[in-house]
Amino acid sequence: MTLLNDKVAIITGASSGIGRAAAKLFAREGAKLVVTGRRQAALDAVVGEIEAEGGQAVAISGDVRDEALQARVADTAVSRFGRLDIGFNNAGILGEMRPVAGLSLDGWRETLETNLTAAFLGAKHQSAAMGQDGGSMIFTSTFVGHTAGMPGMAAYAASKAGLIGFVQVLAAELGRQNIRVNALLPGGTDTPASITNAPDDATPEVLAFVEGLHALKRMAQPEEIANAALFLASDLSSFVTGTAMLADGGVSISRT
């Protein structure tokens, strides 16, 4: 039996990276999907790949900071597939990366709105759609701002650390509805949004440095983080809620 048989899931940031890998994995595990992101063509490609393997998915493009989009995505899950069981709130940005003294207010706000406020909007509408039937909500956070401070990443760290506090409160609020809420904290992951793929930073030296921070001496592939999200989405984690679960290749504990 597949782990998500007959479940309905929302995945944000699904056009590439961790979100794309999770969408394909969740579909293979039996879930019906509503995927969202900024790029309609990229989302359509993901849906096409899922349908080619016999799965079902709907793509809705837009900005996760838009409450109307978040409401539409949750409503579509219910209207198209009859229910909502899983919300994987994965969309996020690195944002403006400068020392605090040089960080613009617009850059600060954009990062917090994309990484934290959008998560609130997702939770608001997804929890209402789940109702009393239970479910699993997952939020992609990070080790940055939780187990490590990294220069130039103040807005990113603040937004992602804020997610952990938000997850704890949400888990306490929704536990009586059997809705589990967890944060997933990846380490360095080889995605288009990774710092190692930024045009100004994508050098072999930077890649080697980032890999060396991890106990495993490598970065994760998106599929590896998707597997961790699958655990939190499925009944394998039926007594796991309110956690900040590291899937970070040992970057939080490595000093070598």
Image (spheres, grey):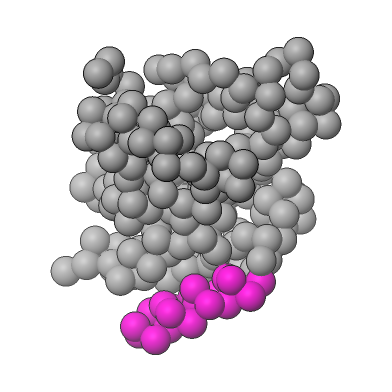
Q: Residue at x 40, y 61 (%)?
A: 21
Task: Inspect this view and state whether residue 254 appears.
Answer: yes
Which image quadrant: the N terminus?
Answer: bottom left
**Residues drawn in magenta:** 40-58
Identified at 34% across, 83% down, the residue is: 53
Q: Position of residue 174 (x, y in %)?
A: 47, 35
204 is higher (above) or lower (below) than 64: above
Majority secondary structure of the magenta segment? helix
Q: Residue at x 52, y 44 (%)?
A: 202
The quarter of the displayed image where residue 111 is located = top right
Q: Is residue 83 above or below residue 173?
A: below
**Residue 200 located within the stretch drawn in magenta:** no
Task: Give coordinates of residue 132: x percent, y percent.
Answer: 46, 48
What is the x, y in percent for residue 89?
Answer: 52, 47
Q: Position of residue 110 (x, y in %)?
A: 75, 36
Report how many numbered discs are placed on residues in the image: 0
Closer-to-camera residue (98/43): 98
Q: Is residue 56 magenta?
A: yes
